[in-house]
Structures are given as C-alpha cells and as structure tokens.
Image: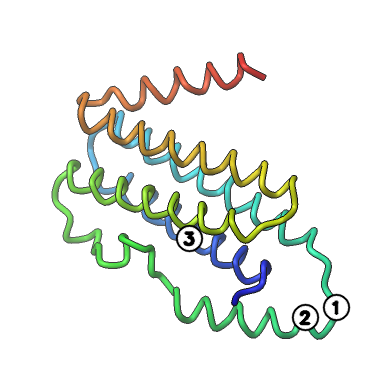
Amino acid sequence: MFTLHEIYDLAMQIEKNGEDFYRESEKKTSKTALKALFIWLAEEEVKHSQWFMERKSLLKTDSETLALDEMTAKMLKDILGDQRFSLGEAKIEHIETAEDLLSIALEFEEDTIIFFRMLRSLIEDDDSIKGLDAIIEEETRHVEMLRDFRDGNGQGLITMKEKKREDISNE
C-alpha cells in the first residue's frame, strides 16, 4: 500500500505529464481557439500539481517515514516516468489532426478522474477530501470542455469562459 506522500507524488507526476502534453499540443495545432484551450488546460494542471504539493507539505512525517517515502517516491517516478496513463502510448510528433489531440486529451482527463476518485477513497482528512473533490470537479469540466470543443467546432473555449464566470459568480 502506498503512503499518502507517495500518492501525492504520483498525482503531481500525472498533473505534470498532463501539463507537458497540453503544452506540446498547443504547439502542434494551428487553430487559435484550440491553442488557447490547451494553454488554459496546461495552467489548470499546474494549479492542481501545486495543490497536491501543498497538501503533501502539510503531512506529518518522522525521519524514518520521510526516508521511506523518498525512496518509494523515486521508485514510483521510475515506474511512472513519462507514463501519462493513456498519454503514454501517444507520440505527439506523430499526431496529425486536432481531432486526435482532442481524443487523447479526453482519454487522459477521464483516466485522471478515475485515479483521483480512487485516491479520494484513501484520504481521511476532510480538508484534503474537499480540495480533491474540487479538483475532480475541475477535471470533469475539462472533459466537458474538450467534448464541447470536439463536438461543437471550437465551442469548448466559449464554454470554458462561461463556466469560469459561473464559478466566480458562485463564490
């Protein structure tokens, strides 16, 4: 069983891999609206990674646990490496269409939601659960935006802006 430290490390790696994919995807497409969507998604992944880093920093550790966590985190990183769940098989340099980029991004976001829901079942701290629920909700919105963009020929960006306005007005 992984410790919460290790799980947070894995979550940060997943978010970093997503960020890298979106930044690479942004360079790959010439569609302005899709570029903007990928840039926004990359920044969302950065924010999520920072949240996991903050949660990890709040965990209590003793020196023995910390040493074990560092060793296991290195092993997890070696195992995960650049594996991006469904993105692991995607060689972005060989992807030729925006539709393919969107399909891969959708699969990645859906896999991330599954992983974070599994992670949620391992967390006992109410503040962490609340924050993770917010991230799961954001990842779910990413799926909706990508689907909207794919199905509505660019409407994903409009939907993204509308949802952001809703978020701000609901606070």
Label 1 secondary element: loop
| Residue 85 on image: x %, y % | 36, 63
For disc 2, the marked residue is: 65
Dot in front, 3 or 1: 1
Dot in front, 3 or 2: 2
For disc 3, the marked residue is: 14
Residue at position x 68%, y 69% in the image:
5
Disc number placed over residue 62 in the picture, else none: 1
Q: Are marks 1 and 2 in contact (CB under 8 Å)?
A: yes
Q: Residues within 10 Å of mark 2 (few under 14, many from 20)?
A: few
Left or right? Give the position of 134 relative to 126: left
Residue at position x 61%, y 19% in the image:
168
Left or right? Give the position of 67 relative to 52: right
In primary-sequence order, the first of circles 3 and 1 is 3
The kind of residue tagged 3 is Ile
Left or right? Give the position of 125 relative to 3: right
Quarter containing the N terminus: bottom right
Q: Is residue 93 above or below residue 68?
A: above
